[in-house]
Image (tube, rainbow, N blue to C red):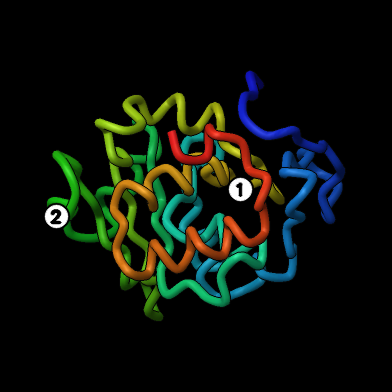
Amino acid sequence: MNRTGPQELVHSTTSGDEPDIVDSRCPVLHKRLNTRLFKDLKGLALPADDFVIAGSAPLYIRDLRDEVSDLDVVAGERCWRQAQPLGSLQPAPYGDVLSVGVVERQERPVGPIEVLNAWFPPLFGNVAQLIENAEVVDGLRFLTLQDTYRWKERLSREKDRDDLSRVRRKFPEAPLWWGN
């Protein structure tokens, strides 16, 4: 995996499967992956090697956010084809992006999980590159802290500014790439 950005640490997962790649200065709280949203996502049986979890979840699993109300899943081509039948196709609020809101599946509600075919294309471009650069935690790919910081800085909504403030408090010495 071609890695750029902060110094990272490779360690074993709790399940012993694929190694986790995490920022060594901000460890992952693995117990947070046992919440309903992550269990629901795994239950969808989407190809885990063809999506990246974006939104605020990368902050949540690192204890840089107290909660997440939904999951934003950015899908590669294979995952996108598999996700489309799971919900209704809608335009996403930012850019020329489509999303499938997965809120109901079989016998019980799921989510809310939103599967998107891109993530802020003017900022990040190719979904395959986001997947390639993702941090793998317990077999799930997460947007890097650097990339999470970049899109939250771009949107600059009140909740994004709050998240950015928490990241800056955790990483007061963060290099210039955090904001580029």
- Rendered image: mark on residue 104: none
Which quadrant of the structure image shows residue 100? bottom left
SS label for mark 2: strand
Decide: few, some or many residues near mark 1? Use Cα within 10 Å; few <14, some 14-19, many ≥20. Answer: many
Q: Position of residue 76 (x, y in %)?
A: 39, 33
Specify the quadrant that holds the N terminus: top right
Q: Residue at x 46, y 40 (%)?
A: 179
Seen in the image, is 94 located left or right of residue 39?
Answer: left
Q: Are marks 2 and 1 in contact (CB under 8 Å)?
A: no
Residue shown at the point (38%, 30%) measured from the top left: 127
Depth check: give the residue in front, 164 or 79.
Answer: 164
* Rendering coords of residue 84 (x, y %): 26, 48
Q: Residue furthest top?
A: 2
Other residues around mark 2 within 10 Å, as few (<14) / some (14–19) / many (≥20): few
| Front one among 164 and 122 | 164
The x and y percentages for residue 14 are 84, 55
Identify the amino acid type marked 2: Gln
Q: Going 39% across and 56% down the picture, which residue do you hit?
A: 72
Q: Position of residue 85 (x, y in %)?
A: 25, 52
Task: Say what secondary structure mark 1 lies in.
Answer: strand
State whether residue 99 is above or below residue 61. Answer: above
> Which kind of residue does numbered mark 1 sit on?
Leu
- Residue topped by disc 2: 90
Residue found at x 62% / y 24%: 4
Instruction: State the mark number for residue 140.
Output: 1
> Where's the C terminus, which quadrant?
top left
The image quarter containing residue 132 is top right
Q: Nearer the viewer, residue 175 or 131?
A: 175
Q: What's the CA distance linking mark 2 and mark 1?
A: 25 Å
Examine the image and state in which quarter residue 124 appears. top left
| Mark closer to the chain start, 2 or 1 | 2
